Structure formats: C-alpha cells, structure tokens
Amino acid sequence: MTRTVRCSLTLALGACALLAGGCQSSPGKIVYTVDVRNQTPQPLWAQLWHETDRGAFQLTNQRLAPGDRAGVGPAKGNVGRTWILFDTLPNPSTPVRFDLEFGSTVIEVTQTSEATDAELIVREIR
C-alpha cells in the first residue's frame, strides 16, 4: 500500500512539473503561419521576421512565382514583434512590412500596375 501511494504521489508531482513549465511554449512567443497569394506579374520573396532584445532575425522565407500561393511558416515569433516582409526585383521603393496578428494570416500581394517596377500593395484577406 505504501509503495502504491508513493508511486501515485511521484506521478502526480511529475505531471504538475510538466504543466508548470515543460509543456508550455516559450514565454512571449506564439506560432505564426502566413498564407501568401502572389498576384504580381513577377517573383515575390516573403520573409517572416521577429525582433528580440538582440535585434531582428529572419525565421523563414519563401519565394513565390507569379500567381503562386504558398505557406510561410509555421515559426515561433515574439508576440507583437513579428512581421512578414515582401520584396520583388526591381522594387522601386523599400520592401513592404506587414505586422502580424496572432496565429494564421492570409495575405494577397498585388501591385499598383502591371509594370514590373510598380509598387507592392499588401492586404489581409479575412
């Protein structure tokens, strides 16, 4: 009987320890996934970034051909400090940054015209 009680108590304490820290995600981080739809007439680079106290770091990236649709992620990023960056060549302005909400996001990327040097337009699809 004593052996059964000790075993049960040990298992219960182990389960509490897992719930307290081991099974939880990193504090301040969440998994981000972006469904990107490239509606531009040229290749598009989509890069998932997050910022830490040591600077900004690229989590993952994806190259999409004209008309392609692809997933970027999943990747863990810092809450409120994670974004996706879009760029093409030639891009007449700076790459376009889109700050991400929690979880999954669907984004369509178009341009102001069909010209290869037209500016990018990024919009979230809900």
Image: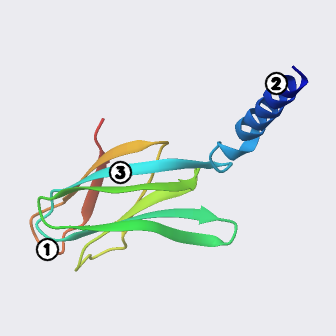
Residue at (66%, 49%) from the top-left corner?
28
Q: Which of marks 2 and 1 is nearer the N terminus?
A: 2
Label tally:
3
- Vertical position of residue 118 compared to residue 2: above or below: below
Circle 2: residue type: Thr
Q: Tell me whether circle 2 and circle 1 mark residues in contact (CB < 8 Å).
A: no
Q: What quarter of the picture does the C terminus occupy? A: top left
- Please give the residue where the numbered disc 1 appears in the rendered image: 116
- Please give the residue where the numbered disc 2 appears in the rendered image: 4
Q: In this view, does 72 lie to the left or right of 78?
A: left
Furthest toward the right, the residue is 2
Q: What element carries label 3?
A: strand
**How far apart are the two marked residues, 2 and 1, measured between alpha carbons?**
73 Å
Q: Which of marks 2 and 3 is in front?
A: 2
Closer to the camera in the image, 30 or 125: 30
- Tell me how the rendering is colored: rainbow
- Please give the residue where the numbered disc 3 appears in the rendered image: 34
**How far apart are the two marked residues, 3 and 1, measured between alpha carbons?**
24 Å
